[in-house]
Amino acid sequence: MSLGTTQKAVLLFARLYLMAAHPIIMHRFHRHLGYWPNPALPQRYHEKILWRKIVDRNPVFVHLSNKLAAKRSARRRCPALATAQVLWVGDDAHSLPVSLLQQDVAVKANHAAGTNVFVRNGKPEYARIVKRADRWMMTRFHHRRHGEWGYRDVPRLLFIEEQLALGGDDLPTDIKVHAFSRGVSHVWIADKLSGRSRTYTADVEPLGLRDHTYPNEEQSLPDSPVTRALIREALKFAARLLGGLDYARIDFMVAGTRLYFGEYTFYPGGGHDPGLDQALAERAEELWDLFASDFLRKRHRGLVRLYTRALRAAIEEKSDR
């Protein structure tokens, strides 16, 4: 199947329109990755994340970017998968319970990424925690510069959960599964306490490559039967947690030898991960089937309908080659 003149014109118009409508996002993409994307006809892995940001407005992204809702969803889909216990939820930083912050707990924001305070032995001090949490509550994580639409309507809440005893014995603290409707591209594990990591295939075979977070060879996390067993368990849970989504990075935590649900990530690295190994990026883009996206499964009208028809035809033309 070959594209017609009208379909090519529609895709060109869509590309120019999307680039003009989101100049900040496009410039950030170019600055991080070194090339101008085609947001109307995404082919590379990072282009597909960009397309997800500005085109594929799946309401499920909002629901599962809500950390508290994601926990409930994970418990429903995978009853055997542990989740850290939530001890308090509120919308006012000054209402954080003093008694709980004398314990070993984690204070988090429901609506944002990278918003965690880990409290140990009453430290940091209560006033410092309140100040940080107050700043989180005044911040909208979604904005035009990042374009991570899924966070836009997540309720702004604070919560306190039990602090898990992560790591130890050369085991990872984190397991992150890149899961697609067609399979898993790779699994990244890390011991964030000691600054070590390793990447595995979907068949749980370790890869020799290093990553940009822990790039040195001495930062390689040892491979072991226990680690491989944890990864296999994470892969089984990830398949169920993905549901009908086209792609999500599904994050787990490891405490002792027990796996805990972490969170869903729909825009890994903000879509700007220049350190991702090229072979892994190519594997990811092969597995990412845009026909499984919410946008291409819906019916549209008018110009959007013309665009979806042209996009479908372009994808089919590429697959026929």
Image (cartoon, rainbow, N blue to C red):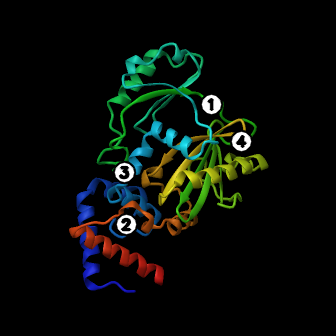
Q: Secondary structure at mark 1?
A: loop
Q: Which residue is mark 2?
A: 296
Q: Secondary structure at mark 2?
A: helix
Query: Residue 54: image x %, image y %?
Result: 32, 57
* Residue 209 quadrant: bottom right
Does residue 70 appear in this view?
A: yes
Query: Residue 195: image x %, image y %?
Result: 63, 41
Quadrant the N terminus occupies? bottom left
Mark sitting earlier along the chain (3/2): 3
Give the residue at x 34% y 73%. Answer: 311
Give the residue at x 58% y 55%. Answer: 239
Q: Mark 2: which amino acid?
A: Leu
Q: CA distance from mark 3 to mark 2?
A: 14 Å
Q: Mark 3: which amino acid?
A: Pro
Query: Residue 277: image x %, image y %?
Result: 56, 61
Q: Which residue is mark 4?
A: 171
Q: Nearer the viewer, mark 4 or mark 3?
A: 3
Q: CA distance from mark 2 to mark 4?
A: 40 Å
Indicate whether 203 appears above or below 110. Answer: below
Q: Which mark is residue 164?
A: 1
Residue farthest along the right direction in this orientation = 225
Mark sitting earlier along the chain (1/3): 3
Q: Mark 1: which amino acid?
A: Leu
Give the residue at x 52% y 13%. Answer: 99
* Residue 179 quadrant: bottom right
Disc count in the image? 4
Q: Which mark is residue 59?
A: 3
